[in-house]
């Protein structure tokens, strides 16, 4: 198996880039700097990525989702926030009891129906601290899974009958039977377990049009392609060990975008060999097409906890 190599893009580095998502309607790439920013970029037909805009959030932000209104839904701080085109951030709901300061929002994605799923996780990877929430089309918020560690990635199969969840604290990727009509999770099965002694923790997660999983591995500088049965099929190398999120982007959805975190806190030698840490990286896997992200179809105003 010959690994592919992802190349660094010229976008400004993030402290902790994460959660890339392709807004097909707007033709824009979105991602976050979890330190407190939402970022926008362009992806031209040649696959080149460039900066477009940045908006400060004023608190940690785990994910951004396009909506059917001129606004964006954020999983940020200890709950959910709305972001307007002029940069105004509004509090939609705080999950104070469930998502305190030490269990911030970590990830998010929308299903085909337009529900937004968002995950939390303990800063110190405390078992049981993480939860998965669902924001319904009427603006109600429900906890659908508890007892997790760090919910780092969420994606669905092309037929919408499986929800995949990457728990970076547990070092697992779990597949749940999924009912897209009701937004409910059924039988879970652990699809992948990563050896605690080896490099790499599952973080970001994307599913291509053929149903293969693409999993970014924090600590390994890799994105791995797996079959729906869990067989390793391809490896993409990234010249930054802290690979975070991944998504397919561009007009043809044929560009794999990988977000990374900076080398802050690593040794001087480790920092020297990854000068592009914190940037987005891209590659075009042969004969692979992604799927567009679905927008959130509910209200971007006061949400209700049930």
Image (cartoon, rainbow, N blue to C red):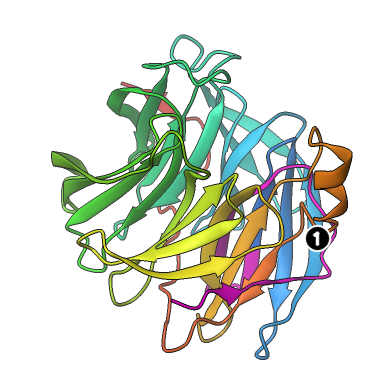
Vertical placement of residue 263 versus 277, above or below = above
Decide if residue 83 is on the left or right side of residue 161. right
Would residue 23 be visible to someone looking at this image? Answer: no
**Is residue 215 positioned above or below 153 on the image?**
below
* Front position in the image: 274 or 132: 274
Looking at the picture, does residue 45 appear above or below residue 1? below
Residue displayed at 40% across by 53% down? 297
- For the question of whether residue 250 can be seen, the reply is yes
- Tag count: 1
For the point 52% across and 43% down, the residue is 300
Indicate yes or no whether the magenta region holds residue 6: yes
Q: Quadrant of residue 116?
A: top left
Which image quarter holds the N terminus?
bottom left
| SS class, disc 1 | strand
Q: Where does the image place residue 219, in percent across and percent down from the top left?
A: 60, 44
- In the picture, measured across the screen, residue 251 lies left or right of residue 197, that is right
Which residue shows up at 50% across the image and 21% down it?
A: 125
- Residue 195 position, x and y percent, is 38, 39
In the image, taking residue 29 as reference, residue 187 lies left or right, namely left
Image position, residue 166 (x, y; %): 39, 43
Residue at numbered disc 1: 53
Q: Residue at position x 84%, y 70% from top?
A: 10
* Quarter of image, res 133: top left
Q: Is residue 82 above or below residue 2?
A: above
- The segment highlighted magenta reads 1-29
């Amino acid at each position: 198996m010959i690994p592919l190599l992802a190349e660094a893009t010229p976008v400004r580095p993030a402290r902790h880039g994460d959660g890339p998502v392709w807004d097909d309607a707007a033709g824009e790439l979105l991602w976050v700097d979890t330190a407190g920013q939402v970022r926008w970029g362009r992806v031209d037909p040649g696959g080149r990525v460039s900066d477009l805009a940045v908006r400060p959030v004023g608190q940690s932000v785990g994910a951004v989702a396009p909506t059917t209104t001129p606004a964006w839904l954020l999983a940020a701080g200890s709950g959910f926030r709305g972001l307007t085109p002029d940069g105004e951030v509004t509090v939609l709901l705080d999950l104070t009891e469930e998502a305190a300061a030490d269990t911030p929002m970590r990830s998010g994605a929308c299903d085909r129906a337009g529900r937004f799923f968002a995950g939390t996780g303990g800063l110190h990877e405390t078992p049981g601290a993480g939860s998965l929430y669902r924001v319904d089309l009427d603006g109600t918020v429900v906890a659908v899974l508890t007892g997790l560690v760090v919910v780092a990635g969420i994606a669905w199969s092309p037929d919408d009958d499986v929800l995949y969840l990457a728990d970076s604290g547990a070092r697992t990727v779990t597949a749940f039977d999924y009912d897209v009509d009701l937004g409910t999770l059924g039988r879970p099965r652990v699809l992948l377990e990563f050896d605690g002694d080896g490099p790499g923790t599952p973080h970001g997660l994307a599913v291509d049009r053929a149903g293969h999983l693409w999993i970014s591995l924090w600590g390994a500088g890799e994105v791995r392609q797996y079959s729906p049965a869990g067989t390793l099929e391809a490896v993409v190398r990234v010249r930054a060990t802290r690979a975070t999120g991944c998504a397919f982007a561009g007009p043809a959805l044929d560009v794999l975008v990988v977000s990374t975190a900076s080398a802050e806190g690593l040794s001087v030698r480790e920092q020297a060999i990854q000068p592009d840490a914190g940037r987005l990286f891209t590659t075009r896997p042969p004969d692979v097409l992604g799927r567009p992200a679905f927008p959130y179809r509910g209200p971007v105003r006061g949400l209700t906890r049930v």
